[in-house]
Image: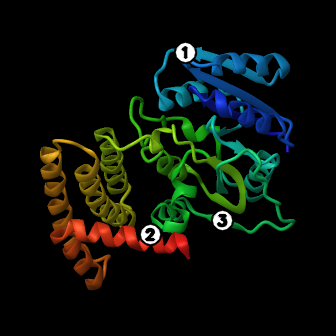
């Protein structure tokens, strides 16, 4: 394999975890790497750490910019990357030493434009998984890869930008939406759909850190509703591409997510009555659209009715069910 790979690492105030991340990238067994560190206006020692590592490894290039958010940093990396393939690693995560090697090998062997790896949640820097000699692989069409976004066990593996390898030409017209959170929800499905085929390797070689200061774990706010911007764009995308099943699955996801956000707004946001009314109105619109689709069974449609009429009780039951799954 002679293809080059650009690893794009957005960096913002992660001095506590950054060295672990960079060490794991520098230890990669695959040699043809370009490592782009996009320092997105860090106010701690992250920028200095980036420079120290760049002085020790010529593969590392550091770009310092004003803070523009995760999407802006990733887009900068995409614009500067020269590799045949691109990989995104968050600066508070880290990767197995064979991460690039295994993903690239699977992509080139199967002629796939994108590869997805399994992942592990970690809370320390000592996690290492033993990679089996025979790694289960699955070849997916672009539609099948999008279907995985709605399959609970595969949701995070499929919907995030990290944990994947993309052929660079997939980004010809695709970028992350600047200034928004849930940027992966707005982008990754498009990249997977643009791929000719996608290979999934069932090896947990990306280590996702449960960072309490990370964007998605730093508390609930009205910004979290930007998720629905991504969902509306996805509905339009699937409709334009005549992917009815994916469109219906997105409607289903949107309906139940309005229930979740309605309850979270009640729990965590003060003076959120206007927002709650807006979410309830959205639930009712989605409910009637879902009843008109033939994709879902009568049993599921009865579930929609219960969730619509009793959103608080439905949410509590779902939380209990989730806790039971985690304990089992």
Q: Residue at x 15, y 49 (%)?
A: 278
Sequence-wise, the earlier of marks 2 and 3 is 3
How is colour applied across the structure in the image? rainbow
Q: Position of residue 172 (x, y in %)?
A: 54, 35
The tag on residue 281 is none
- Image coordinates for residue 272, horizontal then vertical, percent: 17, 44
The residue at 66%/38% (across/down) is 86
Q: Position of residue 263 (x, y in %)?
A: 26, 57
Q: Closer to the camera: disc 2 or disc 1?
A: 2
Spot occupied by residue 116 in the image (x, y as percentages of width and height): 64, 55
Task: Measure how far apart labels 2 and 1 are at the Cα level.
Answer: 41 Å
Report the side of 212 relative to 246 (left or right).
right
Mark number for residue 139? Answer: 3
Q: Nearer the viewer, mark 2 or mark 3?
A: 2
Q: Quadrant of the C terminus?
A: bottom right
Q: Which residue is mark 1?
A: 65
Return the disc, 1 or 3, that comes first in the chain's sequence. Answer: 1
Q: Tell me the distance, in whole angstroms, between the alpha carbons under discs 2 and 3.
A: 30 Å
Q: Which mark is residue 322?
A: 2
Q: Secondary structure at mark 2?
A: helix
In the image, taking residue 171 as reference, residue 21 lies left or right, namely right
User: Mark 2 Cα within 10 Å, few/some/many (few <14, many 20+)?
Assistant: few
- Judged from the image, the secondary structure of the residue bearing numbered disc 3 is strand
Residue pictured at 35% horizontal, 62% vertical: 253
Instruction: Identify the mark nearer the N-term, 2 or 1.
Output: 1
Left or right of residue 3, residue 174 in this image: left
Q: Is residue 45 visible?
A: yes
């Amino acid at each position: 394999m002679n293809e080059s790979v650009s690893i794009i690492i957005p960096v913002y105030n992660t001095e506590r975890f950054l060295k672990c991340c960079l060490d794991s990238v520098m230890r990669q067994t695959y040699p043809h790497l370009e490592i782009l560190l996009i320092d997105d206006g860090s106010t701690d020692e992250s920028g200095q750490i980036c420079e120290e590592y760049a002085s020790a490894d010529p593969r590392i290039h550091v770009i310092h910019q004003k803070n523009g958010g995760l999407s802006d940093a990733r887009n900068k990396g995409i614009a500067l990357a020269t590799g045949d393939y691109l990989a995104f690693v968050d600066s508070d995560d880290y990767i197995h030493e064979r991460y690039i090697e295994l993903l690239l090998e699977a992509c080139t062997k199967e002629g796939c434009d994108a590869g997805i790896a399994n992942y592990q949640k970690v809370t320390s820097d000592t996690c290492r998984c033993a990679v089996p000699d025979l790694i289960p692989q699955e070849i997916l069409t672009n539609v099948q890869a999008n279907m995985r976004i709605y399959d609970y066990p595969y949701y995070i593996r499929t919907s995030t930008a990290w944990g994947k390898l993309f052929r660079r030409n997939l980004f010809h017209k695709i970028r992350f939406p600047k200034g928004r959170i849930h940027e992966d929800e707005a982008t990754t499905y498009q990249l997977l759909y643009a791929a000719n085929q996608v290979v999934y390797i069932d090896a947990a070689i990306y280590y996702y850190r449960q960072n309490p200061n990370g964007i998605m774990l730093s508390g609930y706010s009205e910004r979290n509703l930007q998720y629905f911007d991504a969902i509306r764009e996805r509905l339009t995308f699937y409709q334009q591409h005549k992917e009815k099943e994916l469109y219906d699955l997105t409607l289903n996801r949107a309906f139940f997510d309005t229930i979740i956000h309605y309850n979270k707004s009640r729990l965590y946001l003060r003076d959120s009555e206007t927002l709650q009314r807006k979410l309830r109105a959205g639930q009712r619109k989605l409910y009637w659209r879902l009843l008109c689709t033939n994709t879902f069974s009568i049993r599921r449609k009865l579930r929609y009715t219960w969730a619509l009429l009793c959103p608080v009780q439905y949410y509590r039951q779902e939380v209990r069910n989730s806790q039971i799954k985690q304990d089992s």
